[in-house]
Amino acid sequence: MATRGVVLGGPYAFLGALAEQVEAKGFDAAWVAETDHESIVQASVVLQATERIEVGTNITLAFPRSPTITAMQAWDLNELSGDRFIVGLGSQVKRIIEERFSSTFDRPAKRMAEYVQAMRTVWEIERGEDATFAGEIYQVLRPGLTGKGRAADRALPRVNVAAVGPLMTAAAATHADGILGHPFTSPRYLTDDVLPRIEEALAEAGRSREDFTVNQGVILCIAEDREVAIREAKQQIAFYGTTPNYRPVFDSYGDGELTDQLRAVWKESRQDLDALVAAVPDEAVDRYAVAGTPDEVKDKLAVYDPHVDHLILGGAWYRVPPQRLAENLWAILETFATA
């Protein structure tokens, strides 16, 4: 069975206590995102509150940051935690990177490939090696102010890359330790599209599948009233489904026309939530999410276990009230606890 981690978030006043619960209930990892709060700060809080579990970012936005700064942060957090930190990098989309972060978004797959190589060069320098990297976009040509490090025996931080399309998947398979699969997925899309693409990219890079971690997110909605869980799953499917880049997920079950339908409803209804939910058929929930009562979701989630190394459990968030976000998180902790 795949190992399992839980997505955490919310106010800092509660983040450490939530992380303690993830560890106490027997999960293998906790993951933090970069939406309302900065990812590295969140990861620091979760690492300080735990002793055993791995802690990863899913994701840390790469392009607004220098790869050297990100590498230094990952190196320090790995030391702080006893080698439990995983830095997960993501590209986001052009509009957000340019309009919110005032950064450059061009050739994202190549940019990500060089970003990871630059980070690895920083770590090699920290271990005392004579290393440099000179790419087309990024470069690391000298050590820090105190020169090369002396930590020759230090374990390297692990770096994962979030990928959807073939070019970013190739970048992840060539340069990273693992891939972060988008939660908008389906079992058929995973087995027929994503995994073969990963295997092909690893083969081209001369790497073994055993040395590469496939982490897969899911849209996981749990409620004693299954209709509540179904509605929240539909909200999230509708949100992702309006993005043309995700059409291949719908195509895995022959639902490609849903992308156009949801885009039309999004525009014509001015994002009316009831209209968006009504536009998502019931069978789409079974295909592209895991939703229902605690007993129902156990069997549904198990479908993913044979195909991935690690499952990242997180709920719907698009226009979901804070109380339900908290209830769903607690339901995940209770339903899938092993301790």
Image (cartoon, rainbow, N blue to C red):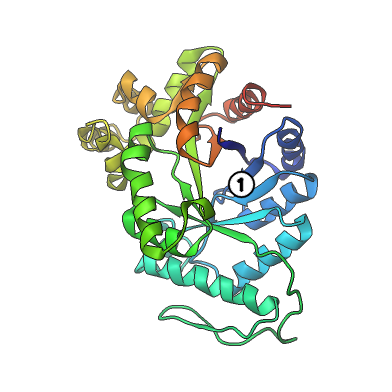
Rendered location of residue 238, percent (x, y) = 35, 33
Q: Residues within 10 Å of mark 1 (few under 14, many from 20)?
A: many
Query: Between 273 and 222, which is closer to the camera in this rendering?
Result: 222
222, above or below 53, in the image: above
Q: Quadrant of the C terminus?
A: top right
* Left-right relation of 131 to 16: left
20, above or below 141, in the image: above
Rendered location of residue 242, percent (x, y) = 30, 40
Residue under the image location 59 percent in, 31 percent down: 322
Rendered location of residue 283, percent (x, y) = 32, 20
Residue under the image location 70 percent in, 35 percent down: 22
Evaluate whether residue 232 shows in this view.
no
Q: Quadrant of the N terminus?
A: top right
Amino acid type at mark 1: Val
Examine the image and state in which quarter residue 66 appears.
bottom right
Residue under the image location 50 percent in, 19 percent down: 299
Residue found at the far top of this picture: 225
Query: Between 22 and 1, which is closer to the camera in this rendering?
Result: 1
Q: Secondary structure at mark 1?
A: strand
Examine the image and state in which quarter residue 49 appears.
top right
Residue under the image location 38 percent in, 51 percent down: 199
Evaluate whether residue 167 shows in this view.
yes
322, above or below 170, in the image: above
Rendered location of residue 218, percent (x, y) = 48, 35
Residue occupied by mark 1: 32
Q: Number of labelled discs?
A: 1
326, above or below 148, in the image: above
